[in-house]
Amino acid sequence: MEIEIAGHHFVLLPQKAVFWKEQKTLLIGDLHLGKITHFRKAGIAIPSVAQHYNFATLDTLVMTSNAERIIFLGDLFHHHYNSEWDSFALWRKKYPALKMVVVLGNHDILPMSLFNECNMCVEDHLVENGFLFTHHPLDVIDSTIFVFCGHIHPVFCLRSAIKQSIKLPCFVKDEQQMVLPSFGVFTGGYEMNAQVGRQIYVIAEDKVIRV
């Protein structure tokens, strides 16, 4: 699903990412690496194969988009250091020419030295071509800016006439802001409501559909 914002073209991808065509940049929100291992250490029986799914999906995105940069919109890593960071460091080495930027989220509490060792550029926020890339959605936005963000893990509930329903991850676009779905698995979701002027794009397996 390709949309145009302020003369730029963005492709909403079923892998829960956005590709900014003009800048050859992938936008990814709320990967939450380390969360699966964190849960498993606490005795919550999440299958370890789930963490490999995140990296396989990242590989697919990089290889199919020919991106030259990734902007992570916060919460790249879930909490304190665990072995999933080592897996990420190995994955990072596969793409030395790919620029990676981390916009810090509330869960990004790892030492800066770890990001530096992985050749990651770290920012509190990033402004480029009239777009603001940040972690938290904004309530008040300057009229000259369009915001891309994450944090709330948006999902939308589709309901049928026979009272069946399903919640699907979604992209939520308001007049000056788009919230990306959580990229990582086992991250939960916050149900979004339809509003006047709001556009919601749900992810249904391998398709992105406007509702």
Image (cartoon, rainbow, N blue to C red):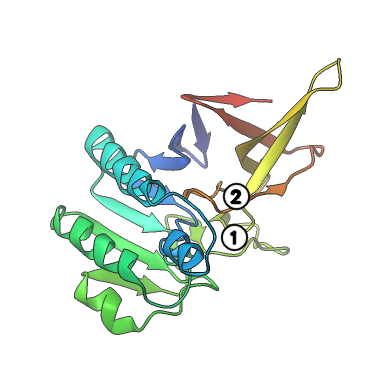
Q: Mark 1 points at which residue?
A: 151
Image location of residue 122, percent across then percent down: 35, 73
Q: What element carries label 2?
A: strand
Give the distance between the C-alpha atoms of the residues marked 1 and 2, in whole angstroms. Answer: 8 Å
Q: Which residue is drawn at 50% across and 26% down?
A: 205
Q: Residue at x 39, y 79 (%)?
A: 110
Instruction: Report if residue 73 is visible in the image.
Output: no
Q: Which residue is drawn at 64% across and 60% down?
A: 137
125 on left or right of 101: right
Residue 71: quarter of image: bottom left
Q: Between disc 1 and disc 2, whose residue precedes?
A: 1
Q: Is mark 1 on a helix, strand or loop?
A: loop
Identify the mark at residue 139; answer none if there is no mark.
Answer: none
Image mark count: 2
> Badge 2: how crowded within 10 Å, few (<14), some, or many (20+)?
many
| Quadrant assignment for the C terminus | top right
Q: Name the residue under label 2.
A: 179
Q: Residue at x 26, y 32 (%)?
A: 64
Q: What residue type is labelled 2?
A: Val
Would you place residue 147 above or below residue 107 in this image? above
